[in-house]
């Protein structure tokens, strides 16, 4: 996968082909100042962070492009301040929308590194919460819970997953509105010390913003996370296994590709999260298979090699006829293994 397009910086040249300066470019006014944005970009460490994002995260090209745009905005804003070109501090609160397992939490962590590296947050940590962490069960319980979370998040990023569950208009006795009001106040008054990221499914977030215009007016960066393609999910699976020193035998790789294609069409599919769950179960079957092998000794390499039966035992394949004409039925499953969705 190629790197994202580099930051483009144009430097004026004199008639000798050297970079123009206030001293050697007679056409420029005597007191004009210059700034080397390429050097600023290099010194900031953004290049390393963006390179890591591009290399570590599979796919997500629109997301990566938006991250680069935001990072570039913040870099230029920092340079402007140094030259006394004051402006309103940029609003950094964000909305991440997309289906489950598309990397929203991971990107929040990387964004925190960028914000910290450029000096927009003090600590660079991420506090990830849901409604249960913010909303109490009785009168007087919500405010302390919400304020405690905000206290932990100060100086960093507060990531609120499935933020729309904060608002439950159908329940008159719900205390989510109290948490919302506290969050809105802090997002406005302490926006120089806290970045809030609201995350969830796109359609529900749209409804949430319509019902809570205060959030919409405070969130300036909306990033949509696309679903991964089948090929991207297969690459993610191989990276997950490599981190645990496992490999896929060629037949297992083909079977996993089939699994991903089938699983996508079934309920509760969660992109990379579903793939991770499938691999966990495949490793479980792999362990049972090795222990039940008739040979007393096995090659050490087999401890790290997943094979087709470890994938095909999934219930996802029940009743599906592959290209070879055979039907992968439940009978192919090890009867000692518990049934599972993945």
Image (tube, helix red, strand yellow):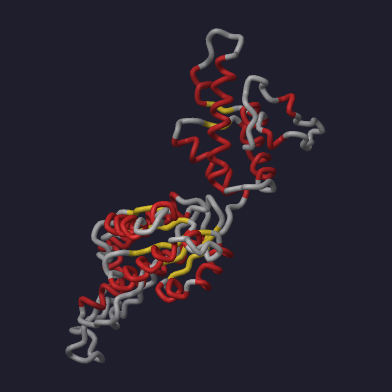
Instruction: Classify residue 14 as left or right of residue 171.
Output: left
The reply to whether residue 62 is visible in this rendering is no
Residue 99, relative to residue 280: is it above or below?
below
* Residue 113 picture location, percent across and down: 32, 57
The residue positioned 66% from the left and 29% from the top of the image is: 313
Residue 105, relative to residue 262: is it above or below?
below
* Residue 91 picture location, percent across and down: 35, 73
67 vs 141, nearest the viewer? 141
The reply to whether residue 27 is visible in this rendering is yes
Instruction: Classify residue 76 as left or right of residue 321.
Output: left
Residue farthest to the top, as pictured: 296
The residue positioned 46% from the left and 31% from the top of the image is: 245
266 vs 187, nearest the viewer? 187
* Residue 49 picture location, percent across and down: 35, 56
Q: How many marks are shown on the rendered structure?
A: 0
- The answer to which quarter of the image holds residue 39 is bottom left
Quadrant of the image containing the C terminus: top right
Residue 332, relative to residue 187: is it above or below?
above
The residue positioned 53% from the left and 50% from the top of the image is: 101
Residue 72, relative to residue 263: is it above or below?
below
Residue farthest to the right, as pictured: 325
The residue positioned 23% from the left and 77% from the top of the image is: 81
121 vs 29, nearest the viewer? 121
């Amino acid at each position: 996968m190629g790197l994202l397009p580099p930051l483009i910086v144009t430097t004026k040249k004199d008639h000798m082909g050297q970079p123009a300066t206030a001293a050697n470019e007679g056409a420029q006014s005597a007191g004009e100042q210059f700034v080397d944005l390429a050097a600023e970009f290099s010194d900031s460490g953004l290049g390393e962070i963006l390179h890591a994002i591009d290399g570590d995260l599979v796919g997500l090209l629109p997301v990566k492009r938006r991250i680069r745009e935001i990072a570039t905005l913040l870099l230029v804003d920092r340079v402007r301040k140094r030259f006394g070109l004051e402006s309103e501090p940029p609003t950094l609160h964000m909305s991440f929308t997309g289906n489950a397992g598309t990397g929203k939490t991971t990107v929040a962590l990387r964004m925190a590194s960028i914000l910290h590296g450029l000096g927009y947050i003090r600590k660079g940590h991420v506090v990830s919460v849901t409604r249960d962490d913010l909303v109490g069960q009785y009168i007087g319980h919500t405010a302390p819970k919400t304020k405690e979370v905000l206290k932990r998040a100060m100086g960093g990023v507060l990531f609120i997953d499935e933020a729309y569950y904060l608002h439950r208009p159908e329940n008159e006795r719900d205390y989510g509105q109290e948490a919302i009001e506290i969050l809105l106040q802090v997002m406005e008054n302490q926006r120089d010390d806290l970045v809030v990221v609201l995350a969830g499914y796109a359609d529900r977030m749209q409804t949430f913003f319509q019902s809570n215009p205060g959030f919409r007016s405070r969130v300036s960066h909306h990033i949509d996370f696309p679903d991964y393609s089948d090929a991207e999910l297969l690459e993610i699976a191989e990276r997950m296994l490599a981190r645990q020193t496992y490999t896929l035998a060629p037949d297992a790789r083909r079977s996993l590709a089939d699994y991903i294609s089938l699983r996508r069409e079934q309920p509760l599919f969660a992109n990379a999260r579903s793939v991770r769950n499938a691999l966990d179960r495949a490793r479980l079957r792999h362990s049972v298979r090795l222990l039940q092998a008739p040979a007393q000794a096995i090659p050490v390499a087999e401890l790290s090699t997943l094979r087709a039966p470890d994938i095909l035992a999934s219930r996802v394949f029940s009743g599906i006829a592959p290209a070879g004409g055979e039907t992968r039925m439940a009978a192919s499953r090890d009867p000692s293994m518990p049934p599972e969705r993945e």
